[in-house]
Image (tube, grey):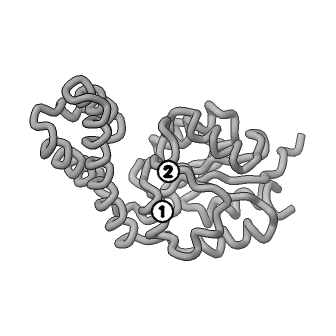
Amino acid sequence: MRALPLRGIVFDFDGTLAVPALSFQEMGQAAVNAVAALMPDYPPKEEPALEWLLKVASHASRQGGEDFAAKVCRAADLAMGEVEVAAAKRGGLFPGVLPMLQKLREHGIKTGIITRNCTRAVAAAFGPEFKLLNCVLSRDDISQWKPDPAHLQAALIQMELSPEHTLMIGDDPMDILVGKKCKTRTAAVFCGHVPKEVLLACQPDFCAEDCAGLMLVLEEAGLLFG
């Protein structure tokens, strides 16, 4: 049976469309420093920054109420955002990303991004070409981030796409996981931080070295531009 053609593609950002210049250690330390300045007895950071900030918010709320918790988390988010924006400007987009998005747009294929980065970082990398995208959902826009399926589900709703006509592309296992949870097709690209063998173990439907190569794979499969 011929596979259903794609009507939309949802991309991860950092390591998928953008050169992975972000240091997660630096970003995490920026968050810790911002929290420590307001709450010296902050909980230890033992998980990724966003998940840690949920713990920080709970701790801060017990200590000083919801307004204090919001202040602490806002300071941490701004500090992380500065690191992310600097990395996005330093790394930029992979070669060929903008022509790829333009071609998809010309053929009526919707494109979007779901990312745990802030919107400012995505905008810094894209500049005025931000308008090529039908949807961008960063951590600024939603309270449940991938690998929670709510992140991708929100994008599908905003883009008016059904899972069976959508492909989720990313460079991290969580991208493949969120696609599988939402029953989209999935694709892995090997241009990010994660080793190829780790991504292949997630059993994506498609894979390639980068998004440009992946478009060729999808065309050969009859899923694009048919």
Residues 118 and 115: in front is: 118
Residue at image position (27%, 47%) is 76
* Residue topped by disc 2: 138
Residue at x 76% of width, y 60% of height: 109
Judge from the rendering whether residue 15 lies leftward or rightward of residue 226; answer left or right. Answer: left
Can you say which quadrant of the picture contains the C terminus? bottom right
Left or right? Give the position of 114 relative to 90: right
Inspect this view and state whether residue 182 appears.
yes
> How far is disc 2 from disc 1 in space, using C-alphas?
9 Å
User: In the structure shown, which secondary structural element does the residue marked by tag 2 occupy?
Assistant: loop
Helix, strand or loop at mark 1: helix
Q: How many marks?
A: 2
Kindly give the residue lying farthest to the right in the view shown: 1
Q: Give the answer, above or below, for where 145 lies relative to 6.
A: above
Q: Looking at the image, which residue sits at the far left?
A: 40
Q: Amino acid at mark 1?
A: Val
Q: Residues within 10 Å of mark 2 (few under 14, many from 20)?
A: many
Residue 47, visible in the rendered structure: no
Say few, some or many: other residues with alpha carbon within 10 Å of mark 1 (under 14 / 14 to 19 / 20 or more). Answer: many
Amino acid type of the residue that numbered disc 2 sits on in the rendered structure: Ser
Residue found 63% across the figure and 69% down from its top: 131
Q: Which residue is mark 1?
A: 122
Above or below 195: residue 88: below
**Residue 143 location (% of width, % of height):** 48, 37
